[in-house]
């Protein structure tokens, strides 16, 4: 029977961005608004984020050529695109089957709470703040934005494309924190409780690697099996600091 899945999938969060730095500064100073002028999709990698992406690329380059990614899919947001292209440019482009931006891998849409800290949401939209606390991160959809379920719906379509077009290949996906967590939800067949436990355990590190390998003996027809989650050793070995700043307002405790 023909293999359904790629041979390998790596899911990676982009390097540290200027937005991550601005959010941390705003929350540390108990401010309501994150001080960043660009659209979210235009936010650049920080200097540290660029170094993290280079360290990630070096880690992939250290693999034997037959084990490196030959398909690269990435969010079109600048910070994810630049992380992905740092890897691609250090690998042999002639060995690549495809390198493509996929808008379905974009950051979660924040709607009217975009650029607001948790304090800012509570101050400007107290009813929404209470609804968010009551409903929880998984199902809450801010006006004009998305819930995690909405993100998962578009990622189901991404996996359909991957199983149709890239079976047996080695696929690198570069996206955002929510993208990493929601792909884990799908690939590891989690439920709401499990994925929120995973999220509460800590933020996804910038340029952290979550990897799956196809195991023909797993399940009835073979499936992808988790090899590593949020693996940061290749970054620390190069002397590049590990960061894990938030992309979105912190979730209420539940």
Image: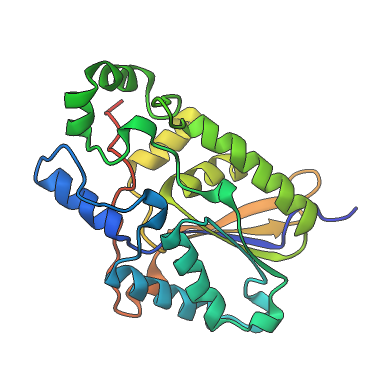
Image side of residue 43 versus residue 103, left or right: left
For the rendered model, the colour scheme is: rainbow
Which quadrant of the rendered structure holds the C terminus? top left
Q: Quadrant of residue 253?
A: top left
Q: Nearer the viewer, residue 232 or 225?
A: 232
In the rendered image, residue 105, in percent from the top left (x then y), is placed at 55, 50
The number of numbered badges drawn on the structure is 0
Q: In the picture shown, does residue 15 fall above or below 223? A: below
Q: Nearer the viewer, residue 183 or 218?
A: 183
Q: Residue lying furthest left in this view? A: 29
Image side of residue 231 versus residue 48, left or right: right
Q: Residue lying furthest right in this view? A: 1
User: Residue placed at 67% from the left, 72% from the top?
Assistant: 70
Q: Nearer the viewer, residue 34 or 63?
A: 34
Q: Quadrant of residue 34?
A: top left
In the rendered image, residue 21, in percent from the top left (x then y), is placed at 23, 57
**Residue 190 makes an appearance in the image:** no
Q: In the picture shown, does residue 54 fall above or below 132? A: below
In the rendered image, residue 37, in percent from the top left (x then y), is placed at 26, 52
User: Residue placed at 49% from the left, 64% from the top?
Assistant: 81
Q: In the picture shown, does residue 233 fall above or below 143? A: below
In the rendered image, residue 150, in percent from the top left (x then y), is placed at 53, 32
User: Residue placed at 72% from the left, 45% from the top?
Assistant: 160
Q: Quadrant of residue 93?
A: bottom right
Q: Nearer the viewer, residue 51 or 209?
A: 51
**Residue 58 makes an appearance in the image:** yes
């Amino acid at each position: 029977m023909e293999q359904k899945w790629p041979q390998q999938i790596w899911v990676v969060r982009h390097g540290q961005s200027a937005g991550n730095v601005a959010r941390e500064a705003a929350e540390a100073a108990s401010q309501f608004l994150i001080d960043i002028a660009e659209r979210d999709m235009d936010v650049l990698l920080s200097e540290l984020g660029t170094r993290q992406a280079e360290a990630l690329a070096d880690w992939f380059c250290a693999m034997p050529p037959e084990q490196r990614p030959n398909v690269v899919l990435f969010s079109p947001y600048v910070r994810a695109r630049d992380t992905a292209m740092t890897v691609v440019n250090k690998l042999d482009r002639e060995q690549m089957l495809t390198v493509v931006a996929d808008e379905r891998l974009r950051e979660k849409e924040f709607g009217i709470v975009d650029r607001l800290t948790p304090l800012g949401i509570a101050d400007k939209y107290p009813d929404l703040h209470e609804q968010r606390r009551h409903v929880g991160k998984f199902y809450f959809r801010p006006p004009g934005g998305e819930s995690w379920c909405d993100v998962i719906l578009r990622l189901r379509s991404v996996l359909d494309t991957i199983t149709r077009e890239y079976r047996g290949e080695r696929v690198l996906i570069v996206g955002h924190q929510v993208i990493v967590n929601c792909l884990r939800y799908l690939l590891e067949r989690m439920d709401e409780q499990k994925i929120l436990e995973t999220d509460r355990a800590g933020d996804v590190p910038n340029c952290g690697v979550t990897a799956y390998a196809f195991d023909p003996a797993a399940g009835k027809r073979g499936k992808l099996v988790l090899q590593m989650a949020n693996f940061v050793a290749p970054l620390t070995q190069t002397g590049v600091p590990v960061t894990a700043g938030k992309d979105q307002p912190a979730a209420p405790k539940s």
